[in-house]
Amino acid sequence: MKKPLILVTNDDGITAKGIKALVEVAQKLGDVVVVAPDSPQSGMGHAITIHDPLRLKKVEMFGVESYECSGTPVDCVKLGKYVVLKDRPIDLCVSGINHGSNVAINILYSGTMSAAMEASLNGIDSIGFSLLDFRADADFEPYKPFIEKLMRSTLEKGLTGGQLLNVNIPNIPGEEIKGMRVCRQSESRWVEEFQENEDPMGKKYYWITGSFQSDDMTEETDVWALENGYISIVPSMHDLTDYYSIEKSKWMES
């Protein structure tokens, strides 16, 4: 029986600990090909490289066919589909495991989720995984059974709608996780600040800082799920239309 083909990518870079853990899980379920950035690409969103050439290098990593790419996470998926696999049918694309949260509005900024979304735009079932632990040496081992269960069920049953799942894992001991909960994206925002400094030439530069705020804490949200010991699963899509407002905006038509 032919094994499913799984494309693995991320935004933390091909040497990140999270992608190694994800590859180890994927290897149990199918044939794995890795295409990932050659350096960290966090916060790149759905950016693509159009002003510079893209470089793709085969590397000996993970014990599977692996490539490092000079571009963004979305570039990696595009090259994986059209260059490395040359339109071989991909059964599942998984992105991550991200070092840090991609909850709520963060999906718009996330390179991890944009890579998964790019695959879903091409009709490929896709999952972005994130662990709420920003440390480079984060321990992903306790969460592998949950990740494997979700990947296996996705391969067996398939996804509907946008064919994209945003999965976030709370940073708690594995035995304390209460389960996986399908929920909606919480309404939230970043309250941003810019720290101003001067370089040795007297020219100003800025570091962006800020804090994440969410007042949407009802039980159906991803923020609530994570804060109450659940892995959050948000079915997502690329259609940003506000359908509720279409009828209410008819007054704009001439």
Image (cartoon, rainbow, N blue to C red):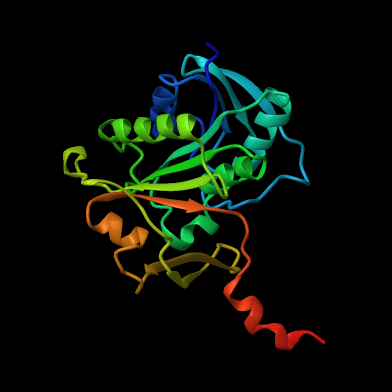
Whether residue 84 is situated above or below residue 162 in the rendered picture: above
Camera sees residue 15? no
Whether residue 127 is situated above or below residue 207 in the rendered picture: above
Whether residue 183 is situated above or below residue 143 in the rendered picture: below
Frontmost residue, 190 versus 155:
155
Q: In which quarter of the image is residue 124?
A: top right
**Hey, which residue is sitting farthest top in the picture?**
1
**Hey, which residue is sitting farthest right in the picture?**
254
Q: Quadrant of the C terminus?
A: bottom right
Whether residue 29 is situated above or below residue 227 in the rendered picture: above
> With 124 as the anchor, is 216 left or right in this view?
left
Residue 108 in the image, given as x and y percentages of width and height = 54, 58
Frontmost residue, 204 versus 224:
224
Figure disc tally: 0
Camera sees residue 34? yes
> With 5 as the anchor, is 225 left or right in this view?
left
Q: Quadrant of residue 153?
A: top left
Residue 152 in the image, given as x and y percentages of width and height = 41, 29
Q: Residue at x 65, y 45 (%)?
A: 121
Q: Which residue is drawn at 59% across and 41% down?
A: 73
Residue 126 in the image, given as x and y percentages of width and height = 53, 39
Residue 167 in the image, given as x and y percentages of width and height = 41, 46
> With 164 as the anchor, is 118 left or right in this view?
right
Q: Residue at x 36, y 58 (%)?
A: 222
